[in-house]
Image (tube, rainbow, N blue to C red):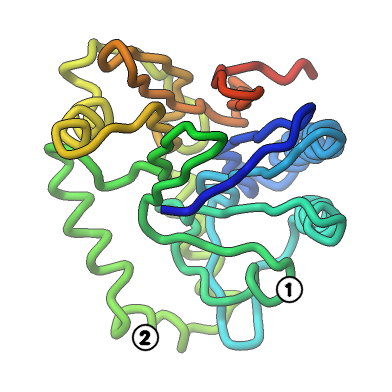
Amino acid sequence: MKHLKVPTGKKVYFASDNHLGAPDRAKSSVRERHFVSWLEEVKKDAAAIFLLGDLFDFWFEYKTVVPKGFVRTLGALAQITDSGIPVYFFAGNHDLWMNGYFEEELGIPVFHKPQQFEINSKRFFIGHGDGLGPHDKGYKRMKKVFTNPVARWFFRWLHPDWGVRLAQYFSVKNKLISGEEDQEFLGEENEWLVQYAKRKLSQDHYDYFVFGHRHLPLEIKLNDKSTYFNLGDWIGHFTYGVLDGSTFELKKFEI
């Protein structure tokens, strides 16, 4: 378990699911500017920033090439880490093909699986959230293909102009990802990440479970001492999480 001590007057921030690049460059650029404004605001009192995946709608690292664009976001993150504020990144299902660029260029560690953190004596279980919990067996099988070293090797042989364009096309065709489909809460029994969190609680205690992926801001009490949070997204909700001392809450960035 990783430990973080937050100094008095400082906060820890969490955000997820920007999907930069979707549904097109023009609309994505507007959202990117909002996100950069948020980064500029929170760095004033941030002790750490957690980004829980799908920052990009598609990201694939070739040996010498990364996707074009997103320079405002990457530049803002570089300034934050250069100032000494740690940033932690959890790869999502759209940017899971990371292979060293964030670590080498930005000094940002990248996690491909959920992680346990203790922050000011509060136990956190943190991850993007894709492929966890019951059901969704089709996606779980597909993820095994996407992360297979042989499949990645074959994709790398596509010219980036073709590979990136093809992947972006199929990514944006998903209406939930592009923000064109309403998200609806259908009860705890239908929230797979809630079921996953409850199962983890049977093995160990956590004060907070924090995930992305769902695109819907959620706060659900799991028991008297544990709470599940979903961060929402930066497509339509512009929500984020903040740990102020020992209290975690969801907030909305006012544009």
Q: Which residue is mark 2?
A: 154
Q: Residue at x 62, y 26 (%)?
A: 242
**Left or right, 6 with reference to 30:** left
Residue 232: x and y, percent? 51, 26
- Say above or below: 38 vs 143: above
Q: Place residue 161 in its image quadrant.
A: bottom right
Q: Residues within 10 Å of mark 2 (few under 14, many from 20)?
A: few
Give the percent coordinates (x, y) of residue 235.
60, 30
What residue lies at 22% left-to-right and 50% top-to-bottom? 139
Dot 1: element:
helix
Kindly identify which numbered label has been placed on residue 192: none
Q: Nearer the viewer, residue 116 or 173?
A: 116
Residue for badge 1:
105
Side (left or right) of 34 relative to 17? right
Q: What percent of the width, then of the height, locates residue 132?
A: 24, 43
Q: CA distance from mark 2 to mark 1?
A: 25 Å
Give the amino acid at mark 2.
Phe
Q: Earlier in the sequence, mark 2 or mark 1?
A: 1
Amino acid residing under circle 1: Glu
